[in-house]
Image: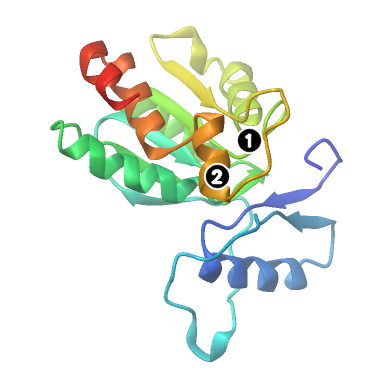
Amino acid sequence: MACLPNMVVMAPSDEAELMHMVATAAAIDDRPSCFRFPRGNGIGAVLPPDNKGTPLEIGKGRILAEGHRVALLGYGSMVQQCVEASSILRSHNIFVTVVDARFCKPLDGDLIRRLAKEHEILITVEEGSIGGFGSHVSHFLCLNGIMDGPLKLRAMVLPDRYIDHGSPEDQIQEAGLSSKHISATVLSLLGRQKEALILN
């Protein structure tokens, strides 16, 4: 959907964000919009008062945790895996920034520039494959010359193959997108391969 001109593409990280994105889509009256949410259960997020969402600022993500060296940019339900990965990494004395991107299009360019400036490593995590959120972030960084420096960028995406039917948790595990996989990727990029192998 993001290849369509002027399209707003968003994905909620939990059931409260879904309510806000429904309100956002209803409020948009000058262009098309869509949002993606996976099957399965919510995480038990605190819902807005009166069960009514509030329209979000278009194209703006949010920082859930501030760290250094590494930033995890989660999109949609993968934000929860990033939050869990940050807990695992804290036990290794690594404190990462965790971001809920909210929007694939338009991207939060200011936030991505800031993350690229303040971190050595950016890792995007999504339940998509080719041409998704990670591709849009990479495209943005390249167009703006941000990849010309020492920044390391990795996109954690679904493999380009069919995944067997199963619970969302089993499929995430099979796809290599679990919190342990994310943590192992961070450890490996920081040169701590032995610790990464233990998690895999």
Residue 149 visible here: yes
User: Looking at the image, is 141 positioned above or below residue 13?
Assistant: above
Q: Is residue 87 left or right of residue 48?
A: left
Residue appearing at x 63%, y 35% in the figure:
133
Q: Quadrant of residue 143?
A: top right
Q: Quadrant of residue 24?
A: bottom right
Q: Amino acid at mark 2?
A: Tyr
Give the position of the C terminus as an image quadrant.
top left
Residue appearing at x 47%, y 19% in the figure:
153
Q: Is residue 18 left or right of residue 90?
A: right
Q: In this figure, which residue is indicated by the disc labeled 1?
A: 133
Q: Amino acid at mark 1?
A: Phe
Q: Residues within 10 Å of mark 1 (few under 14, many from 20)?
A: many
**Residue 171 horizontal/vertical position (percent):** 58, 40
Q: In this figure, which residue is indicated by the disc labeled 2?
A: 75
Helix, strand or loop at label 1? It is: helix
Which residue is nearer to you in this view: 166 or 158? 166
Which residue is nearer to you in this view: 56 or 173? 173
User: Looking at the image, is 165 positioned above or below residue 186?
Assistant: below
Which residue is nearer to you in this view: 126 or 58? 126
**Residue 73 horizontal/vertical position (percent):** 46, 38
Whether residues under marks 2 and 1 lie with C-beta atoms below 8 angstroms apart, the answer is yes
Residue appearing at x 84%, y 57% in the figure:
31
User: Looking at the image, is 146 positioned above or below residue 1?
Assistant: above
Residue 101 visible here: no
Helix, strand or loop at label 2? It is: loop
**Residue 56 horizontal/vertical position (percent):** 59, 65
Dot 2 or dot 1, earlier in sequence: 2
Give the position of the N terminus as an image quadrant.
top right
**Residue 114 horizontal/vertical position (percent):** 40, 34
**Residue extending farthest bottom:** 50
